[in-house]
Image (cartoon, rainbow, N blue to C red):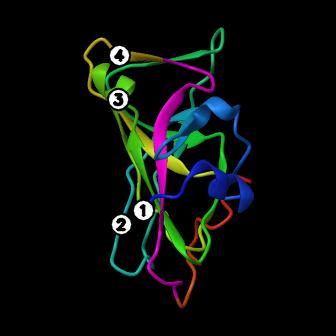
Amino acid sequence: MILPKEILLNRKFVRDTINNSQFQPAGIDITFKKAYSYKTAGKIDFDNRERKISKVAPIPFIDDEVKLALGAYKVIFNEYVHIPQDAAAFCFPRSSLLRSGITLECAVWDPGYEGRSEAMLIVLNPHGAILKRNAKIGQLVFVKLVEKTSYFYEGTYKKENK
């Protein structure tokens, strides 16, 4: 079952929204806070003992816009999310991004995750992209689980970007 606006608000799944226009019939639009360019390679292994996350550098806003060339970027959302024990969330790119040659890649948001999440924005349009501060770039869809999980997400990214 997809969770409606009233449940999202009453149970405080999301905070730091810009305004009520973000609430959609099947989720909430999440907005662009910051963009970063990748500066080093990442290293991914099985059990994270050798994991090295890529270093990044912030891309400055100029007149409330960020100009992005063809490539991949780390982005941070404005909204702070709290996923309860009986839900999970999935993020999808907004159709305006796709129609402009841009996509958004997100991981599953597990029960127990909370934070101001990060994702990867990929500019495929050879002419680049311009993002305004607070642009709606993704739609976060919350689903109610059949039953509560027996444990929460307790990984490295819990409470990230407070």
Image coordinates of residue 142 in percent, x first then y, are 50, 58
Q: Can you tell which of label 1 and label 4 is closer to the viewer? A: 1
Instruction: Say which of 146 and 129 sits in front.
Output: 146
**Are discs 1 and 4 less than 8 Å apart at CB?**
no
Mark 3 surroundings within 10 Å by alpha-carbon count, few (fewer than 14), some (14 through 19), many (20 or more): few
Q: Can you tell which of label 3 and label 1 is closer to the viewer? A: 3
In the image, residue 123 sits, relative to residue 140, either above or below, namely above
Q: What residue do we see at 49% from left, 84% from top?
A: 147
Question: What residue is disc 1 on?
Answer: 108
User: SS for tag 2?
Assistant: loop
Mark 2 surroundings within 10 Å by alpha-carbon count, few (fewer than 14), some (14 through 19), many (20 or more): few
Distance, label 3 to label 1, CA atoms, is 19 Å
Q: Earlier in the sequence, mark 2 or mark 4?
A: 2
Q: Is residue 132 magenta?
A: yes
Q: Can you tell which of label 3 and label 4 is closer to the viewer? A: 3
Q: Amino acid at mark 2?
A: Ile
Circle on res. 128: 4
Q: Can you tell which of label 1 and label 2 is closer to the viewer? A: 1
Q: In this image, 69 relative to 55: left or right? A: left
Question: What residue is disc 2 on?
Answer: 44
Quadrant assignment for the N terminus: bottom left
In the image, residue 19 sits, relative to residue 120, either above or below, namely above
Distance, label 3 to label 2, CA atoms, is 30 Å
